[in-house]
Every structure is written in structure tokens, then in C-alpha cells.
Amino acid sequence: MKVRKSYLLLASVTVWILLGRLLNGTHTLQIATYENTAFTSYIGEKALDFRGNRTESTAFIYFFNPIRGAIDGFVQIIRNLIAVPAQNSVIPIIGWLGVVAIVAFAVYATSQWRTALLAVSLLLACGALGMWQFTMDSIAMTLAAVLLSLAIGIPLGIWAGLSDRVLKIFTPFLDLAQILPTLVYMAPIALVFMIGAASATIATMIYSIPIAIRITSHAIRNLNQAPVEAAESMGSTQKQKLTKVQIPMAKQMIVLGINQTVMAAVSFVVIAALIGAPGLGKPVIEALIIRNVGQGFVAGFAVVFLAILLDRSTSAAAKRQDSFIPETEKQIKTKRITLIVAGILTIVAVFMSRTMLWAAVWPKEVTIAPQVAKVTNDATAWILENLTIFTVGFKDLISYAFLNPLETQLAASPWYVTVAMIVALALIIGGTRIAILSFVLSMAIVLSGLWYEAMLTLTQTIVGCLLTMIIGLALGIWTGRSDRAERALRPFLDAGQTLPAFVYLVPMLGLFGPTRFTAIATGIVYSIPVVVKIVCEGIRAVPHSLIEAATAAGSTTRQIITKVQLPAAKKTMLLATNQGLIYVLAVVVIGGFVGAGGLGYLVIAGNSKPELQGKGLIAGVAILLLGVIFDRIMQAGARRSS
Amino acid sequence: MSSASPMISVRNLWKVFGNNPEKVIGSPDALLTRTELRAKTGNTIAVRDVSFDVAPGEVFVVMGLSGSGKSTLVRCMTRLIEPTQGQLQFEGEDILKVDNARLRELRKTRFSMVFQHFGLLPHRKVIDNIAYSLEINGVKKDARHARANEVIELVGLQGYANAYPEQLSGGMQQRVGLARALAVDPQVLFLDEPFSALDPLIRRDMQQEVIRLHHELGKTMVFITHDLSEAVKVGDRIAIMRDGAIVQIGTPEDLVANPADEYVANFVRDIAKSHVLTLKHLARKAEPGDATDGPELAANTIIRDAAQVILQSHKPVRVNDNGAALGIVSSEDVLRLISGGA
Ligand SMILES: Nc1ncnc2c1ncn2[C@@H]1O[C@H](COP(=O)(O)OP(=O)(O)OP(=O)(O)O)[C@@H](O)[C@H]1O
Ligand SMILES: [Mg+2]
């Protein structure tokens, strides 16, 4: 049965290659970037009409516009507080000194002074990079999105935690949110809520609410049920059970969920600059567009600092909840006194930042931005001059060995050959249902008129995923087998997962220039941590007794890895591949505007070029369809292999 | 014991897990074994047509192997699990008919449960764990703490009122569990394998504790265990369950002396007979040559407790059941029983 399957796969690939060679260049459905098909221009017109309706249709007047207004207002209040002056004012309500003091106080109050010190240093570093106002804007956007996300996500999460029915209803949406590339839903939201802070906030919320729901419901569901049952046996009402038992017990996990929600929000807020989010995303995008690596690094560092700051302060708060035993009276007393002192100092600082100009506006002279830009620009130049052999060599190697042949095969073959191949693969790996689904979705892409672009994106995603899996598997097996390796790599993996994908584009642009390879490399770097983590866990989950038995039977290390650990962890491997694919796809499309082309470019261009709006919207859908095809085939494969 | 009206009365109680549970009861499927039924309909009969009474002040023990339905039965009795069918009365009140408010009322004031895994609230101090049920009863803080301190003393946890559960050993945590159950002064305690998670020495202490509390407070108890020696030690009567059904109910002596079937016999085989049987079981007619002027002992004396007197006496002991002479027991009779003979 197994053997037959791999023969089938081999046979269909051979047929595919032969057909592709034979019919090369025919029926590729390629159209020029600025060309529209009847369908794309129809959608473009519809979008235009839709937008024109903003002041007329009831849906807008009574629903969308009020929401936009409310959220805009909410964001504006927070921005006025720390980032931008309100209407008839020249400075924000709280100047930089006040913000630094408040952050220090808040972090100190929820965790410890060391974390507070780190937070202050990172904040000052952002200021020194000349990014104070952008940073404040990003914080304000993140704060607004997080507050709203939690206000919605935590209650829904609790609800889903208590009721199986509700969870069942939510699950498909939560699953979809996990595979939805971020780029996909920005354009439709911007269409409804206009480019600007409101759209950015809503898009961010769509990204982060599922995370809050998922973790909260998980927290409630995975509580030790014994105390919950005991509370019920004592005659508690549902409400008493919830407020006196379940929520207090789940608090620690929920705080962890807050941390994850914050991190999701901050990484999205940066990317949401594409639809008008104020903040650090703007200078990053600008730098990427004008290919100024130095400036990109300056803004990119600020993003990294902000991410670390938010991660450290929220995860430290979660850690403090580790034990249910509160501090002793004495500890509480000392902390209370220091808190009072710190509170007074904070109030003084805030007051100063409202009355003295030096404390209100970040002094322009205090900056290291030019130096950082120069150093990174010089470094890039040096690399381009001296290491081209390696970077270009690597790039060319991958391009000639993988990218070009695959692109020829996927994009330059007639569309019906490629569709047939996808359906055949789905049939062999996933079965009839998956094959039908793949056929329908592929045909939808064909009919949308963006087949050629989709195949470019597919090529890049597959190659990126392939490389990710090679590197990720190696690192994952290594860390899975060695505690030392795990300890050494863990900080990088954690850090890698908290940074927004966007900032990886900057150094990759420096290394590889504006090519599709930059997008692929970014995708690889971004998705390796998650793949390594999953593989590592899978290897570690293989029962020790299996390995002992194999060792006792005289297996070599290589045999143990290939004959015992990998097969036993097969399901995890497939899961890792699936995650890798989804991550790479999400990043590769963002790489669209540093020269990767494909669907991602259309989506991003659609935001700014009216004539491409229709194409952009459809491209977003096409990305989603590609993602779903991948995801379904891989998931089915994983299910069947287990 | 059967004379007084029962505290709890269970009649034909069923609990079937899975879809359409009512359909299984009364159908031919109900006769299938667990595995067969599960394969066929996906249902599990956890409690099968169970009936028994618990008298006021009695300690009623339910025993059985893992999976025999003990926990399900005890949870059905407090409706933490809804029974599928049957009657359940508490002091004459039909528990299965009461609405949620009344059920909560009963749980708050009349029944208490003690759990195998303690089920303490990790975020509350010992005293607030114990005061929890008073708190949801609306008792003011001072009053409920005063009461909690009383029960803390009762279970011997003085000095730990302000500790948190995770700072206590398992045995102490279960004392908190007991104290919590006693705080509302309930009429019935349900204990689901309360000491299974404790190590043997602590377990023995805790068994003593339950016996002491029972003597002091006279609560009715339904006590679940799979440890026979524990059952014998604390129980007035023992019900033995297999695959959801009760196979036999009786005093420890009944079970050892007249096991209903092989299953029960296997169950009680490991028990030292001298620990459960009374002199009544050993008493025989005096044969010619037996002295009939030995010391006199009551028929309901446990053999273990009588052994010393019998073995030290040169003459067989005369057994007396409320004034009627049942016969005699000699040293040889006792030795034969202890060494494993009939
Ligand atoms: N919620 C449930 N859904 C389906 N089956 C259940 C459920 N709870 C218990 N069962 C089944 O009912 C049967 C009786 O379980 P129960 O927990 O009452 O046994 P037990 O005698 O308490 O065992 P143990 O000594 O292991 O605690 C078991 O076969 C169990 O698998
Ligand atoms: Mg049980």
C-alpha cells in the first residue's frame, strides 16, 4: 500500500515534468502587471462603487462609519496622550520623560526593578534612534488594539472555555485565523473602513482576538477539574464557580495569553503601516521602498526594541503569577513603600514633561540614528563588495538549482497541466474529498485571472519551505537530541518568534538586493524557529524506551535517527512542514514589494494604485486559496499517516 | 439499623454514558458486557440498576475495582452527574425531582463531599478554603472564619489557617478537605477514595481520624474505596460493585463468611478473617470432653480481640449472644482460622 503510493507520486511527477516540457510556454495565463482581465476590472469597479457609497448606503451610515469613528476616536485619545499633539495643542499630553517614568513604574509594579530598567533602556534607545514619535505611535496603536482585543477576546474565550457548543462554533474561525496570511485581509478592511488608524486597528484585532480567545478558552478548559467539581459539590452557582474558582485559577494562563496577544498586535501594527497605521512600520516601509538599508536598520532596531520591551514586561508579569502564594506581609510592605516613592517620582516626571519643553519633546540633538545608518550602510556596502561571491553565489545556486526549474514547471506549463498535477497530488496524499476541494480552489484561482502570479508565489513558497525544512529539520533534530543545543538555541528561537516578519526584510534586502530571493530568505529566517520548535518537541516526545530498545539492538546513531526517531515523530514532521509552509507563504507575499512579484506585490500595490485595486483584492483571496489548498493537503496527510 | 427510616434511599438507579442513554435501559443491549455495548452503541453503563438504603449514622462503604462505577454512583447521589433513571431519596425527599435552587440548597447545607484529589482552591488560604461553602451561603466574614477555626481545630490543623494548599503535605491537604466538608455541619458526607492518594502511614492516620470524627459527630457517611482493609476498618456495611452493578451488600463479616459469588470471594480473600469475623462464626456445640466452665465472651466480639483471652485460657470460651448460649470456642479453633483453615 505504502510502496504503491510513492510509486504513484513518482509516476505523476514524471508525467507532469514531461507534459510541462512538451507544452512549455503555452496556456500560461500570464498577463502584464497593469493589465486587467474583465473580472479584475469588474471587481475594481465594484470596489470603487462600494467606496463611493460611504456617505450614502445605510450599512455605512449606520454601521461601518460609526465603528470607524469610535475606533478612530479611541486611538486618537491614546495617541494624543503620548504620541501626537491634540488639536489645539503643541505637545502630546505626556512628554517623553513622563512616558519613560510611567513605563518604569508600571513594569516595576507588575514585575521587578530589573525588568523596569530594561524597559527604560529600550525606550530610551528608541528615542536615541530618532524614532520617539514613531515608537509612541506604535505603542498607542498596540495599546488600543490590545485593549479592544482583550475586551472582546477574553469574555469570548471564557465562554468558549465553558461551553462545548460555543467552542465548536468558534473553532473553524480560529483555525482559519491561524492560516490566514496577514496581508490577505488588510485590503478588504481598508476598503470598508478606509486607509487609516481605524482600519489598522481592526485588522490588528482580527489578528490578535483569535489568539486571546484560544488561550483563554484553553486556560479555562485545562484547569485542574477537581477544585471546580468541589466548588460545584458545595452548591456554588455558575457565576460563583466562574468568579471564585475558574477565573482565579486560570489567571496565570490568561496573563500569558495577554502576552501573546500583545506580541501578535505589535507585529501586526508594524505591517499595518501598509494600510495607514501610524508608527514604526512607516519608516521601515519607506526605507524598503527606497532601498535604503541604513534607514531600514534604524527603524528596524526600534521595532526590535519595542518588541523586546513589550515581551519582557508582559511575560515578567505572567511569571510573577507562577505561584498562588502571595508575598509575605513584609515583602508587601517594602514594595508598598517603594511603590509610593516611585509613584510620586512618576507624577513629578509627568508634571515636568507637561511643563518643560526639554522633558516634553525628545531633544533632536540626542540621536545616534545617523551613526547607526552609516555603520549599517557601510557594512552593507562592504558585504556587497567583498562577500558578493557568497551572497550572489548562494542566491544563484538556489535560483538555478530550485527556483528556475520549479518556476518553469509551475508557471510556464499550461495551467491545466499544473491544476491536474495539484489535484493528483491531493488525491494521492489526501483522498477524494481533498482532491475535489483542491480542484475547486485551483479552478477559482484560474478563473480569477491571477493564475500566473499565483504560480510565482507558489514557487517561492515551495522553495522557501523546502529550505526551511532542511535547515529546520537539522536544527530540530539536533536540539531534540541534545539538551545543550536546546539551551543554546532556545533564546534565539524565542526572540525569533516575537519579532515581526517585516524587520527581517531589512537585512535580507541588504544581503540580496531587491529580488524574489530576499522574500524567500526572509520567509526562511522567519519560519525556522517555529519549525525547529515543533520538530524538537516531536523528537523529544518519542518514548525513551523505543530508543533504548534500538540502542540495545546495536543501532548506530544515524539508524536511531532515521529508523526510530523520525518515523515515530512523523506526524509532528508533517505538522512542522505545514506550519513552515503557512509561515513562509505569509512572509513571501509580504516580500512582494521588495521585488518578489507574485500575488503579494499585487495586494500591496492594490492598496496604493487605484487601477490595481481589483487585482489586489483578488490576489488576497488567491493567497488565501493557495494557503487553504496547502493546509488541507498537509493536514490530510498528517491524519492519514497517524 | 433497618428499623429507623433511612437517611438515603437509592432504588433502581442507572447511569448510562453516551448518546440516547435511556434507549439502552430495558433493551436487550443492557445485557451485553461493557466492551460489547461500547463497540455496538458507544454507550457505557457506569451504574446498573443499583438499590440500597443508608441508615442515619451509618458508614456505608462502596467497593469495587477500578472502573466499576463507584465514582459515578457517588456523583449521581449528589447529582454532580445526572442519573439516567431511578429513584433517589434523601430523608424522604425525592432528590431527582428538586429544582436547581433546592439542589444547591441541599449541597450547601446537607451533603458534603471529600475528593480523592482534594480539590482545594489553590489561590485561597486554608481558612478561606474551609470557609468557602459558608461564604457562598452568605455568612459574614467574621462568623465564617470563627466557624472555620473550629473545624480547623477539629481536624488537627491548628497553626495552618493562613497557609496555602501547595504548602501542605498530602495528608494535611486532605485534612483541609475534611474540614471543608464539615464546615457546614452536613448530615451526610460523601467520600470518594479520600485517602487513595496518600502513602500508607498517613492513610492509616487519616482512617483513624475518620473513625474518630464519626464517633464524635455521628455523621452518616458514604465512603468509596478500593482498599478492602480500609473498608473493613471504617465501614458498618460494604457494598461490592462490579461493572456498575452491586454484587453484594453486607457487614464485613457477612462478606467474608458468605461471599455471594467467586468475585466477592476473590475480593475478600486477602483479608485476615480474624479481623472481621466474630465469635458467632466460630462457635460450635460443645463435644464430650470439652470443658464448659471456661470464661464467657459476647458473640459479637471480633475474633482478633478475643484471641488473647481464648489462647491464654486453658478451657474453651463460652459464647453468649444476648444471654443465649451459642456454644464454645477453643484455642485450636482460633489457631485453625488464623492459619488459614475454614
Ligand atoms: N463522562 C464519562 N463519559 C463516558 N464514560 C464515563 C464517564 N465517566 C466515567 N465513565 C465510564 O464509566 C465507568 C465507571 O467509571 P467510574 O469513574 O465511576 O469508576 P470508578 O469505580 O470510580 O473507578 P476508579 O476506581 O478508577 O475511580 C468507566 O468505565 C468509565 O470509563
Ligand atoms: Mg473513582
Image (tube, coloured by chain):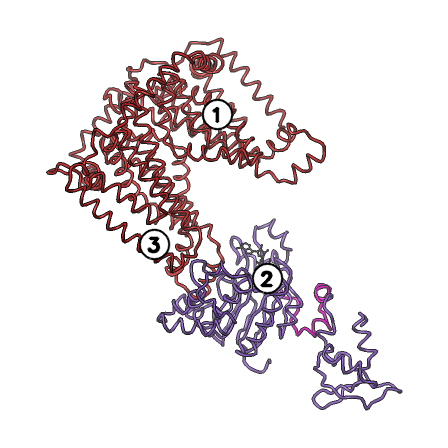
Chain colours: A red, B purple
**B204 and A127: which is toward the camera:** A127
Q: Quadrant of residue A276?
A: top left
Residue identifier under label 2: B198
The vertical placement of A255 against B9, above or below, is above
Q: Can residue A596 be seen at all in this image of the molecule?
A: no
Which span of residues is magenta-colored? Answer: B245-268
How far apart marks 2 and 1 lie (CA) works out to: 50 Å
Pinpoint residue B295: horizontal percent, then vertical percent. 77, 88
Pinpoint residue A636: horizontal percent, then vertical percent. 51, 32
**Dot 2: within a 10 Å radius of its alpha carbon, few (fewer than 14), some, or many (20 or more) residues?**
some
**Subunit bearing disc 1:** A
Q: Secondary structure at mark 1?
A: helix
Q: Quadrant of residue B278?
A: bottom right
| Amino acid type of the residue that numbered disc 3 sits on in the rendered structure | Lys
| Amino acid type of the residue that numbered disc 2 sits on in the rendered structure | Leu
**B336 and A50: which is toward the camera:** B336
Residue identifier under label 3: A335
The vertical placement of B248 against A333, above or below, is below
Q: Which mark is residue A468?
A: 1
Quadrant into which the C terminus of chain B falls: bottom right
Task: Looking at the image, tell me whether mark 1 or mark 3 is earlier in sequence order.
Answer: 3
